[in-house]
Image: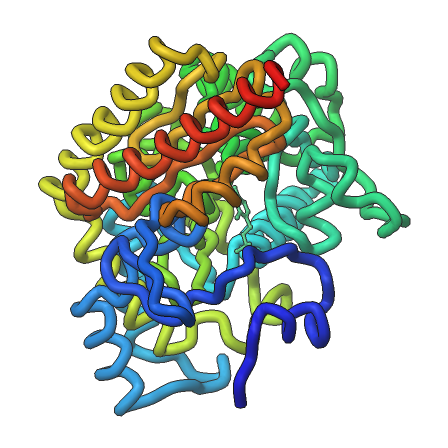
Amino acid sequence: MKVTRETFNDVMMPCYAPGNMIPVKGKGSEVWDQEGKAYIDLTGGIAVNVLGHSHDELVKALLDQAQNLWHLSNVMTNEPALRLAKKLTELTFAERVFLCNSGAEANEAAFKLARRYQHDKGNTHKKTLLAFNRSFHGRTLFTVSVGGQPAYTEGFDPIPGGIVHAEFNNLDSVMEKIDDTLCAIVVEPIQGEGGVKPADKAFLEGLRELADKNDALLIFDEVQTGVGRTGHLYAYQAYGVTPDILTTAKALGGGFPIGAMLATDQVGKSLIPGTHGSTYGGNPLGCAVAEKLLELVANADLLAGVGDKAAIIKEALSKFNDQHSIFSNIRGEGLLIGAELAEPFIGKASDIIRQARENGVFVLVAGSNVIRFAPALNIEQEVLQEGMARFFRTLTDLLNSNKNTLTD
Ligand SMILES: *Cc1c(COP(=O)(O)O)cnc(C)c1O
């Protein structure tokens, strides 16, 4: 059956507005569309394909598992799930793991666990989840309500209660919102969708202190920052601030859907039989891929190389900016980089990524005004440089056409 971009308009719910081309193949950091046109991927499928497309060892892990066992109900456990959970506990602060299929599910589980933990402690008044403006935690009704973007809950009310929002990187604003109902503080160490905004170290340290002082939990949403993205396996390890609960997804399966919620033993043991579950959570296929992926990413050389590649992007952006002054700010950690647009490009991020795609390179937006880069950690230097060159060609073209309109 022949399908085209038009088919999308005919049969898909219109919650996305995808580009005009349809990718059909990817290898490493390159992608080809239906017409055979090649693209360089500087997005890693929104921080997902952390080892690029169709990585040989991940393909092998998936195929090997597919020959043996695809699915079991949760009335039995399975070897890949146990090995993955063990690995996650060895590599992080966590002692217990809940496996699921996506970032939203991991966060949903985290928020439920936090409330249940307080309930089990007899803190039946401690229900409030304190989250941050412009944060993003997923699209289920609970997670989107905890997220700090009011537009995303518009028309979906009534939304769940017991949620308050404070200003990111502002401890005074957090203290103003705390009362004795505080259950947990939920934060992204770097706000991803909200514009690639890193938390200050003192801010996360302050949140840890405030959580402890108020008998509340600290939850880090590392769905975007986790699994090597920042040059550390998890961003909390670089900050030196340890949460009670951490959520991870996106890159965890390198493109195969899987998520996990990690917690200390003390907190995690509240999810007793019957309190939570997922049909596909912990399925052998996803776990086999994630196990191999973690083995490959938790590698000192790969993680050490992230800084060099990040420097190539940041230096190229700065150099271009010295000549053209179109970014007001270039920021981020490791290979999660945001370039905030200045005049004449304010509000034009979506146009830029569309035009860049025409020129053979994928970049992302983060919010309305930030261009985001999240390439595979193993992107080859030449591919990265060519991708940046295509991006700058796009900006130069847009600057020239802008000038022409002005002189017309
Ligand atoms: C993408 C993202 C989510 C949601 O993950 P899904 O897999 O799309 O449900 C949650 N939190 C953060 C920080 C994210 O970047």
Residue displayed at 47% across by 23% down: 400
Scheme by which the image is coloured: rainbow
Q: Quadrant of residue 213?
A: top right
Q: Residue furthest front?
A: 408
Total numbered circles = 0
Instruction: Inspect this view and state whether residue 270 appears.
Output: no
Give the residue drawn at x 21%, y 33%: 309
Residue 170: x and y in percent read 60, 12
- Front residue of 178 and 317: 317
Judging depth in this view, the residue of 363 and 156 nearest the camera is 363
Quarter of the view holding residue 182? top right
Residue 199: where, in percent of width, then height?
A: 47, 21
Q: Position of residue 393 (x, y in %)?
A: 36, 33
**Position of 46 relative to 401 (above/below):** below
The relative height of residue 404 versus residue 6 in the rendered view (above or below) is above
Identity of the residue drawn at 28% across and 28% down: 313
Where does residue 133 sit, x and y in percent of width and height? Answer: 67, 27
Q: Is residue 288 visible?
A: yes
- Image quadrant containing the C terminus: top right
The residue lying furthest to the left in this view is 301
To which quarter of the image does residue 256 belong?
A: bottom left
The relative height of residue 222 versus residue 21 in the rendered view (above or below) is above
Q: Residue at x 31, y 35 (%)?
A: 335
Closer to the camera in the image, 297 or 389? 389
Q: Left or right? Give the position of 166 relative to 151.
A: left
